Image (cartoon, rainbow, N blue to C red):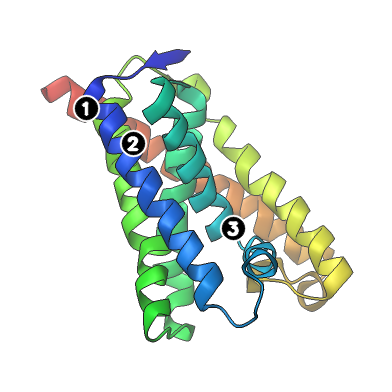
Protein backbone atom coordinates (compact mmCIF):
# COMPACT_ATOMS: atom_id res chain seq x y z
CA UNK A 1 0.00 0.00 0.00
CA UNK A 2 1.34 3.41 -0.99
CA UNK A 3 1.08 5.96 1.81
CA UNK A 4 0.80 9.68 1.03
CA UNK A 5 2.60 11.64 3.73
CA UNK A 6 1.65 14.95 5.27
CA UNK A 7 3.75 18.10 5.09
CA UNK A 8 4.99 17.54 8.64
CA UNK A 9 5.91 13.93 7.89
CA UNK A 10 7.83 15.03 4.81
CA UNK A 11 9.70 17.71 6.75
CA UNK A 12 10.71 15.28 9.50
CA UNK A 13 11.73 12.67 6.92
CA UNK A 14 13.83 15.29 5.15
CA UNK A 15 15.61 16.24 8.38
CA UNK A 16 16.44 12.60 9.13
CA UNK A 17 17.62 12.07 5.56
CA UNK A 18 19.97 15.05 5.72
CA UNK A 19 21.34 13.93 9.09
CA UNK A 20 21.97 10.41 7.79
CA UNK A 21 23.67 11.66 4.62
CA UNK A 22 25.86 14.06 6.61
CA UNK A 23 26.94 11.34 9.06
CA UNK A 24 27.86 8.97 6.23
CA UNK A 25 29.73 11.69 4.35
CA UNK A 26 31.63 12.68 7.50
CA UNK A 27 32.58 9.05 8.13
CA UNK A 28 34.11 8.75 4.65
CA UNK A 29 36.37 11.71 5.46
CA UNK A 30 37.47 10.80 8.98
CA UNK A 31 38.21 7.15 8.15
CA UNK A 32 41.80 6.29 7.33
CA UNK A 33 42.63 6.59 3.65
CA UNK A 34 42.88 9.40 1.14
CA UNK A 35 39.90 8.52 -1.05
CA UNK A 36 36.40 9.05 0.39
CA UNK A 37 34.88 6.83 -2.33
CA UNK A 38 37.15 3.95 -1.32
CA UNK A 39 36.24 4.58 2.30
CA UNK A 40 32.54 4.49 1.41
CA UNK A 41 32.99 1.16 -0.39
CA UNK A 42 34.71 -0.26 2.70
CA UNK A 43 31.97 1.13 4.95
CA UNK A 44 29.29 -0.59 2.89
CA UNK A 45 30.53 -3.92 4.20
CA UNK A 46 28.54 -3.12 7.34
CA UNK A 47 24.80 -3.57 7.74
CA UNK A 48 24.76 -0.36 9.77
CA UNK A 49 25.83 1.68 6.75
CA UNK A 50 23.43 -0.18 4.45
CA UNK A 51 20.57 0.72 6.79
CA UNK A 52 21.62 4.32 7.33
CA UNK A 53 22.07 4.86 3.61
CA UNK A 54 18.65 3.31 3.00
CA UNK A 55 17.18 5.73 5.54
CA UNK A 56 18.89 8.66 3.84
CA UNK A 57 17.64 7.66 0.38
CA UNK A 58 14.12 6.50 1.26
CA UNK A 59 13.30 9.30 3.67
CA UNK A 60 14.77 11.75 1.19
CA UNK A 61 12.36 10.29 -1.36
CA UNK A 62 9.47 10.85 1.06
CA UNK A 63 10.57 14.44 1.63
CA UNK A 64 10.69 15.15 -2.11
CA UNK A 65 7.77 13.08 -3.40
CA UNK A 66 5.57 12.52 -0.35
CA UNK A 67 4.86 8.84 -1.00
CA UNK A 68 6.35 5.48 -0.02
CA UNK A 69 5.17 1.88 0.05
CA UNK A 70 4.15 1.06 3.62
CA UNK A 71 5.97 -2.30 3.55
CA UNK A 72 9.25 -0.61 2.64
CA UNK A 73 8.82 1.92 5.44
CA UNK A 74 8.07 -0.90 7.89
CA UNK A 75 11.13 -2.89 6.81
CA UNK A 76 13.29 0.24 7.10
CA UNK A 77 12.08 1.00 10.63
CA UNK A 78 12.67 -2.59 11.72
CA UNK A 79 16.16 -2.69 10.19
CA UNK A 80 17.19 0.58 11.88
CA UNK A 81 15.75 -0.61 15.19
CA UNK A 82 17.82 -3.77 14.94
CA UNK A 83 20.95 -1.75 14.12
CA UNK A 84 20.60 0.10 17.40
CA UNK A 85 19.69 -2.96 19.45
CA UNK A 86 22.42 -5.26 18.10
CA UNK A 87 25.09 -2.59 18.40
CA UNK A 88 24.29 -1.50 21.94
CA UNK A 89 23.66 -5.02 23.27
CA UNK A 90 26.30 -7.06 21.44
CA UNK A 91 28.95 -4.88 19.83
CA UNK A 92 29.43 -1.61 21.73
CA UNK A 93 31.40 -3.23 24.56
CA UNK A 94 34.23 -3.99 22.12
CA UNK A 95 33.97 -0.75 20.16
CA UNK A 96 35.42 2.46 21.58
CA UNK A 97 35.41 5.24 18.98
CA UNK A 98 37.02 8.56 19.85
CA UNK A 99 36.91 12.09 18.50
CA UNK A 100 34.70 12.71 15.48
CA UNK A 101 34.31 8.99 15.03
CA UNK A 102 32.37 8.93 18.31
CA UNK A 103 29.87 11.46 16.95
CA UNK A 104 29.33 9.69 13.62
CA UNK A 105 29.06 6.38 15.47
CA UNK A 106 26.27 7.80 17.62
CA UNK A 107 24.50 9.07 14.52
CA UNK A 108 24.72 5.67 12.79
CA UNK A 109 23.73 3.54 15.78
CA UNK A 110 21.52 5.76 17.93
CA UNK A 111 20.23 9.02 16.45
CA UNK A 112 19.22 7.90 12.94
CA UNK A 113 17.74 4.57 14.13
CA UNK A 114 15.69 6.20 16.89
CA UNK A 115 14.55 9.05 14.64
CA UNK A 116 13.51 6.64 11.88
CA UNK A 117 11.55 4.41 14.24
CA UNK A 118 9.78 7.39 15.81
CA UNK A 119 9.02 8.82 12.35
CA UNK A 120 7.47 5.50 11.33
CA UNK A 121 5.45 5.24 14.54
CA UNK A 122 4.19 8.79 14.20
CA UNK A 123 3.43 9.00 10.50
CA UNK A 124 2.94 5.54 8.99
CA UNK A 125 -0.73 5.25 9.96
CA UNK A 126 -2.41 2.29 11.65
CA UNK A 127 -3.96 0.99 8.44
CA UNK A 128 -0.87 1.45 6.26
CA UNK A 129 0.40 -2.10 6.71
CA UNK A 130 -0.97 -5.06 8.63
CA UNK A 131 0.40 -8.25 10.08
CA UNK A 132 0.70 -9.75 6.60
CA UNK A 133 3.58 -7.34 6.02
CA UNK A 134 5.61 -8.94 8.81
CA UNK A 135 7.55 -11.48 6.68
CA UNK A 136 8.97 -8.66 4.54
CA UNK A 137 11.42 -7.78 7.31
CA UNK A 138 13.21 -11.13 6.81
CA UNK A 139 14.31 -10.08 3.32
CA UNK A 140 16.61 -7.43 4.76
CA UNK A 141 18.93 -9.67 6.86
CA UNK A 142 18.86 -12.44 4.23
CA UNK A 143 19.98 -10.10 1.43
CA UNK A 144 22.68 -8.58 3.58
CA UNK A 145 23.92 -11.99 4.73
CA UNK A 146 24.37 -13.06 1.13
CA UNK A 147 26.29 -9.88 0.38
CA UNK A 148 28.47 -10.25 3.50
CA UNK A 149 29.35 -13.85 2.67
CA UNK A 150 30.31 -12.96 -0.91
CA UNK A 151 32.49 -10.08 0.27
CA UNK A 152 33.93 -12.24 3.04
CA UNK A 153 34.86 -15.01 0.62
CA UNK A 154 36.60 -12.48 -1.62
CA UNK A 155 38.39 -10.47 1.09
CA UNK A 156 38.49 -12.80 4.12
CA UNK A 157 36.81 -10.03 6.11
CA UNK A 158 33.59 -10.69 8.01
CA UNK A 159 32.18 -7.57 9.70
CA UNK A 160 30.21 -9.39 12.41
CA UNK A 161 31.24 -12.36 14.53
CA UNK A 162 27.89 -14.08 14.00
CA UNK A 163 28.50 -14.13 10.23
CA UNK A 164 32.13 -15.27 10.34
CA UNK A 165 31.76 -18.40 8.20
CA UNK A 166 35.35 -19.74 8.54
CA UNK A 167 35.16 -19.49 12.33
CA UNK A 168 31.60 -20.79 12.67
CA UNK A 169 31.05 -23.30 9.87
CA UNK A 170 27.87 -23.60 7.82
CA UNK A 171 25.61 -25.25 10.46
CA UNK A 172 26.24 -22.55 13.08
CA UNK A 173 26.09 -19.75 10.51
CA UNK A 174 22.73 -20.93 9.16
CA UNK A 175 21.46 -21.24 12.72
CA UNK A 176 22.62 -17.68 13.41
CA UNK A 177 20.90 -16.36 10.28
CA UNK A 178 17.67 -18.19 11.15
CA UNK A 179 17.83 -16.77 14.65
CA UNK A 180 18.49 -13.30 13.29
CA UNK A 181 15.49 -13.60 10.99
CA UNK A 182 13.28 -14.61 13.91
CA UNK A 183 14.56 -11.69 15.97
CA UNK A 184 13.80 -9.32 13.09
CA UNK A 185 10.27 -10.70 12.86
CA UNK A 186 9.78 -10.54 16.63
CA UNK A 187 10.89 -6.95 16.82
CA UNK A 188 8.89 -6.08 13.71
CA UNK A 189 5.85 -7.52 15.48
CA UNK A 190 6.67 -5.42 18.54
CA UNK A 191 6.88 -2.28 16.41
CA UNK A 192 3.61 -3.14 14.67
CA UNK A 193 1.88 -3.73 18.00
CA UNK A 194 3.29 -0.51 19.44
CA UNK A 195 2.00 1.48 16.49
CA UNK A 196 -1.46 -0.05 16.77
CA UNK A 197 -1.53 0.74 20.49
CA UNK A 198 -0.48 4.36 19.89
CA UNK A 199 -3.02 4.94 17.15
CA UNK A 200 -5.77 3.29 19.19
CA UNK A 201 -5.18 5.76 22.02
CA UNK A 202 -4.83 8.78 19.73
| Among numbered discs 3 and 2, the one appearing first in the sequence | 2
Asked if one can make out residue 194 in the rendered structure from this viewpoint, the answer is no
For mark 1, give the secondary structure: helix
Q: Give the x, y percent position of residue 193.
A: 31, 32
Q: In the image, is residue 164 above or below residue 186?
A: below
Q: Give the x, y percent position of residue 114.
A: 31, 51
Asked if one can make out residue 146 in the rendered structure from this viewpoint, the answer is yes
| Among numbered discs 1 and 2, the one appearing first in the sequence | 1
Pointer 1 residue: 8
Pointer 2 residue: 13
The count of marks equals 3
Res 172 quadrant in image: bottom right
**Disc number for residue 47:** 3
Query: Alpha-carbon neighbours of circle 2 within 10 Å: few (<14), some, or many (≥20)?
Result: many
Q: Is residue 94 left or right of residue 146?
A: left
| Among numbered discs 1 and 3, the one appearing first in the sequence | 1
Query: Alpha-carbon neighbours of circle 1 within 10 Å: few (<14), some, or many (≥20)?
Result: few
Distance, label 1 to label 3, CA atoms, is: 29 Å
- Can you tell which of label 3 and label 2 is closer to the viewer? 2
Identity of the residue drawn at 41% across and 50% down = 81
Q: Nearer the viewer, residue 146 or 116?
A: 116
Q: Nearer the viewer, residue 188 or 56?
A: 56
Identity of the residue drawn at 19% across and 29% down = 198
For mark 3, give the secondary structure: helix
Q: In the image, is residue 96 above or below residue 106?
A: below
Distance, label 1 to label 2, CA atoms, is: 8 Å
Amino acid sequence: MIVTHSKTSRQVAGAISIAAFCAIAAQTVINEGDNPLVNLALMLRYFTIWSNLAAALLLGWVALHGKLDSRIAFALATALAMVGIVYHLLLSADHHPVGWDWYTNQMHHTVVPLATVFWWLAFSGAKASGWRSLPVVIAVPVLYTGFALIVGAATDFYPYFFLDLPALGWPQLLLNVAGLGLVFMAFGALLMGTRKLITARA
